[in-house]
Image (tube, helix red, strand yellow):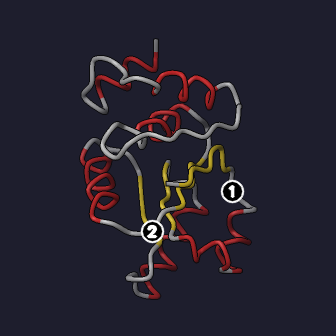
Amino acid sequence: MKEMTLLNQVFGYDAFRSGQKELIDALLNGQDVMGTMPIGTGKSLCYQLPALMLPGLTLVVTPPSPQIREEITALRRVGVAVAFLENSLSPEQYAETLRRMKAGIFKILYVEPERLSDEEFLALSQSVEISLVAVE
């Protein structure tokens, strides 16, 4: 099963935690889901693992936080193409991230909520395949 292989090889776990498999299976079956879990119980895995299995981009809407930055670093460490569109980027970094998004380089793109009102980002979002949107 591809889910279990990814769970082990990419994320380093041998088993799902309570509720994770059900959420992941629902997402992979094209259902809209809402998962509410306490901090530190593996919510992020519920969209990160499907992101690696789905064909397009997974867009994660979240404010910046040390935890999100740690997740991005950990994903990059295991070879996942991921970026974060945040206010701290220079105009050049922002433009380069959008260029790479358009080129289909990323599997996961974290974006601050205010990006959802940025016309340039919204226009680009309509031109790329977005398989999953998660709100963290």
| Vertical comparison of 85 with 105: above or below | below
| Vertical comparison of 86 with 107: above or below | below
- Per the rendering, the mark at residue 63 is 2
Among numbered discs 2 and 1, the one appearing first in the sequence: 2
Of the residues shown, which amino acid type is indicated by label 2?
Answer: Pro
Per the image, the residue denoted by label 1 is 128
Pinpoint residue 105: horizontal percent, then vertical percent.
50, 54
Label 1, secondary structure: give it: loop
- Cβ atoms under marks 2 and 1 closer than 8 Å: no
Q: Nearer the viewer, residue 96 or 6?
A: 6
Pinpoint residue 114: horizontal percent, then vertical percent.
58, 77
Label 2, secondary structure: give it: loop
- Please report the residue visible at 33 percent of the width from the left and 66 percent of the height from the top: 65
- Per the rendering, the mark at residue 66 is none
Using residue 124 as the reference point, say whether residue 24 is left or right of it.
Answer: left
Pinpoint residue 118: horizontal percent, then vertical percent.
65, 80
The quarter of the displayed image where residue 104 is located: bottom right
Local packing at callout 2 (Cα closer than 10 Å; few below 14, some 14-19, many 20+) is some
| 3D distance between C-alphas at marks 2 and 1 | 22 Å
Q: Nearer the viewer, residue 133 or 1?
A: 133
How many numbered callouts? 2
| Vertical comparison of 129 with 51: above or below | below
Q: Nearer the viewer, residue 127 or 44?
A: 44
- State the residue lying farthest toward the bottom: 91
| Vertical comparison of 99 with 136: above or below | below
